[in-house]
Image (spheres, rainbow, N blue to C red):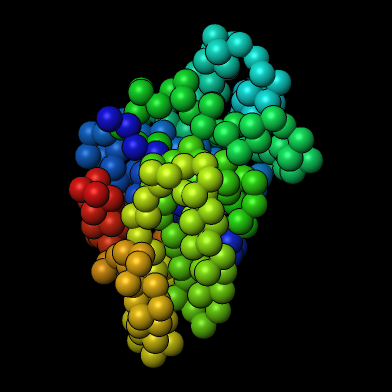
């Protein structure tokens, strides 16, 4: 059985892409078949996995798949396109994006079944993977709705920062709306605290506030991700933290989160 997981937050820079890369990579290292989908026109997930825009000239990317699915192309055609968009790898396979994905800002709202386009795309390939991770761009918009509609569950990274809780209410509401109208089976795997600086009261306070304010209805992972310069460096080499610096605490925390996600 395949499981699709969105990494979502209304806020930017909270560790969505970092978490998508490092959780998906760890699960792949456990022998599972894993696909990561870059649903962000900043295309940071593609870059994290070593896929640079120069590698994608004349390649099919997520943008092309959306255009084809919105044009209502035949199932066979879409299936063929989706398979040719996947960048196969010895680690995590990727459906990459480029800045062109931003053109969907105008196109997507006009599409019929506009909330279900990503679900239609992933239907073609879901059975070939044990896990599919969707890295969303910041925002609670139609992109996020597409991701949530296509997903079985969601992970919500929250930066351990005084402003980290901003937008969390909005994410919770969006999930509730998607559940009510579009995807009743959508689950929340949990809230994941990121960039945690151990020696600050502020981080400890944020953790308590998250647990007290949301913990009665949303799981908050006990494990949190510490701030580490190694985490920030790894993308430059196109590899995950499990290859770059597997012994650091943040890598081990990502490993524990990944195992918990697999058990859920
Ligand atoms: N635990 C960490 N320790 C140190 N740096 C981190 C950590 N997690 C993320 N970062 C860094 O913080 C920045 C933002 O992280 P990331 O790109 O994962 O966030 P994001 O939520 O995907 O951002 P966006 O909303 O722009 O897509 C990056 O430079 C990343 O390397
Ligand atoms: Mg990102």
Residue 35 lies, in percent from the top left, at: 41, 33
Seen in the image, is 1 located left or right of residue 71? Answer: left
Seen in the image, is 166 located left or right of residue 220? Answer: right
In-front residue for pair 258/54: 258
In this picture, is 226 found above or below 41? below
Residue for point 35% across, 60% down = 190
Image quarter for residue 210?
bottom left
- Whether residue 245 is visible, yes or no, is no
In this picture, is 195 found above or below 60? below
Residue lying furthest bottom in this view? 201
Residue for point 54% across, 26% down = 121
**Quadrant containing the N terminus in the rendered view:** top left
Q: How many marks?
A: 0
In-front residue for pair 229/125: 125
Residue 37 lies, in percent from the top left, at: 50, 37
Residue 45 lies, in percent from the top left, at: 52, 45
Seen in the image, is 213 located left or right of residue 110? Answer: left
Residue lying furthest right in this view? 106
Residue for point 45% across, 38% down = 36
In this picture, is 4 found above or below 58? below
Residue 158 lies, in percent from the top left, at: 46, 68
- Whether residue 67 is visible, yes or no, is yes
């Amino acid at each position: 059985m395949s499981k699709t997981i969105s990494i979502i937050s209304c806020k930017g820079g909270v560790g969505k892409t970092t978490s998508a890369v490092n959780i998906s990579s760890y699960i792949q290292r456990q022998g599972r078949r894993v696909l990561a989908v870059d649903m962000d026109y900043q295309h940071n997930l593609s870059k994290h996995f070593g896929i640079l825009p120069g590698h994608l000239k004349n390649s099919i990317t997520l943008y092309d798949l959306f255009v084809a699915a919105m044009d209502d192309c035949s199932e066979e055609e879409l299936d063929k396109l989706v398979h040719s968009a996947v960048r196969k790898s010895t680690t995590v396979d990727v459906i990459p994006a480029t800045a062109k994905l931003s053109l969907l800002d105008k196109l997507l709202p006009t599409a019929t079944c506009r909330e279900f386009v990503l679900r239609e795309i992933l239907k073609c390939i879901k059975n070939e993977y044990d896990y599919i991770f969707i890295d969303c761009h910041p925002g609670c918009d139609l992109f996020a709705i597409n991701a949530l509609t296509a997903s079985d569950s969601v992970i919500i990274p929250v930066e351990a920062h005084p402003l980290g809780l901003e937008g969390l209410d909005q994410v919770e509401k969006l999930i509730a709306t998607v559940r009510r109208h579009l995807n009743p089976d959508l689950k929340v795997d949990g809230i994941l605290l990121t960039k945690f600086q151990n020696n600050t009261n502020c981080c400890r306070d944020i953790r308590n506030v998250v647990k007290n304010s949301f913990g009665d209805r949303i799981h908050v992972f006990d494990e949190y991700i510490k701030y580490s310069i190694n985490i920030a460096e790894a993308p430059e080499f196109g590899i995950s933290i499990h290859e770059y610096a597997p012994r650091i605490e943040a890598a081990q925390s990502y490993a524990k989160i990944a195992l918990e996600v697999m058990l859920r």
